[in-house]
Amino acid sequence: MAHAISLSDANWNRSDVVASDEATAIEIVGLNKWYGAFHALKDVSLAMPVGRRIVICGPSGSGKSTLVRCINRLETYQRGTIRIRGKEAASTPGRPADGRPEVGMVFQQFNLFPHLTALANCTLALRRVLKKPAVEATEIAMRHLERVRIPEQAQKYPVQLSGGQQQRLAIARALCLDPRVMLFDEPTSALDPEMVREVLDVMIDLAKSGMTMICVTHEPGFARAVADDVVLMDEGRVVEISPPSIFFTAPRHERTRRFLEKVLR
């Protein structure tokens, strides 16, 4: 089975990568992103086959969230290429791109519509973007609310839900559009510790279903449980990509070892 490949990692051993005919879900080549004079992403290259689960970790400011936001075209990038299932995505937000509907994203701060019920949050895009009839949209939404274990909250507003329930609602809303790739940007960072487990359990279920996932997180337990590969980013670059069995026990790079000493402590 192929691993994700970092073309920017000069020390990556290509003999570790077994040739595979798996379709590529996401391919990133030479991605560079600047905020003014600040170089946020530096020649990042990754390849991700369909059905793989990748966890991205690293210190604050390393470029993790910027990378996933570029994949979903929420951020512009100045140089490089992003292909989603072989089709090049536009580098500017708001421009049509064939890959956009195939990507769903879950944010740190939920980003729910506070004036809409949980059910309406889920049906809004189904009705207005995909033009689904109200009955069909409701059926789809309820199926995914059940999938994230909050169907009984359908008529409540976000303010009436716990943090964990709000994040599960955000996951259900993204799933309603049936994305082929799910992006998670530190989905548990805004939660109280007792609520983290319920969100991670839902994400583990998604991973077991075969969902292609990229997750930015500092949860080592989640990475060990579901990741096919763990990526360490630092200062805008990919430092290491390894399966969890290597990443957490015998990392290839000294920077990875220093990071793990702080995280696992």
Image (cartoon, rainbow, N blue to C red):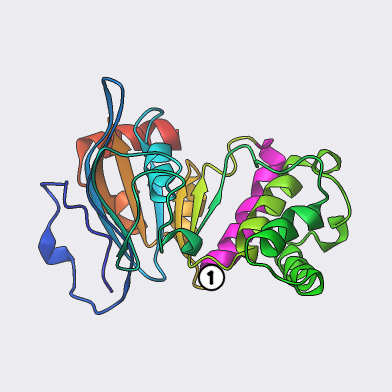
Tell me residue 15's x, y (percent).
11, 65
In front of the other: 132 or 188? 132
**Is residue 194 magenta-colored?**
yes
Name the quadrant of the N terminus: bottom left
Residue in the image at 61% along x and 57% along y: 174
Residue type at mark 1 is Lys
Secondary structure, magenta segment, majority class: helix
Residue that carries the numbered disc 1 in the rendered image: 208
Would residue 229 appear left or right of 105 to someone viewing this image? Answer: left
Q: Which residues are magenta?
A: 191-207
Left or right placement of residue 162 versus residue 47 in this view: right
**Which residue is pictured at 65% across the width and 45% down the height?**
196
Left or right for 186, reference 161: left
Query: Is any atom of residue 108 visible in this view?
Result: yes
Name the residue located 71 percent from the left edge and 41 percent from the top edge: 194
- In this rendered view, identify the residue nearer to me: 259 or 93: 93
Considering depth in this image, is 60 or 173 the residue closer to the camera?
173
Exactly how many numbered labels are in the figure? 1
Q: Quadrant of residue 234?
A: top left
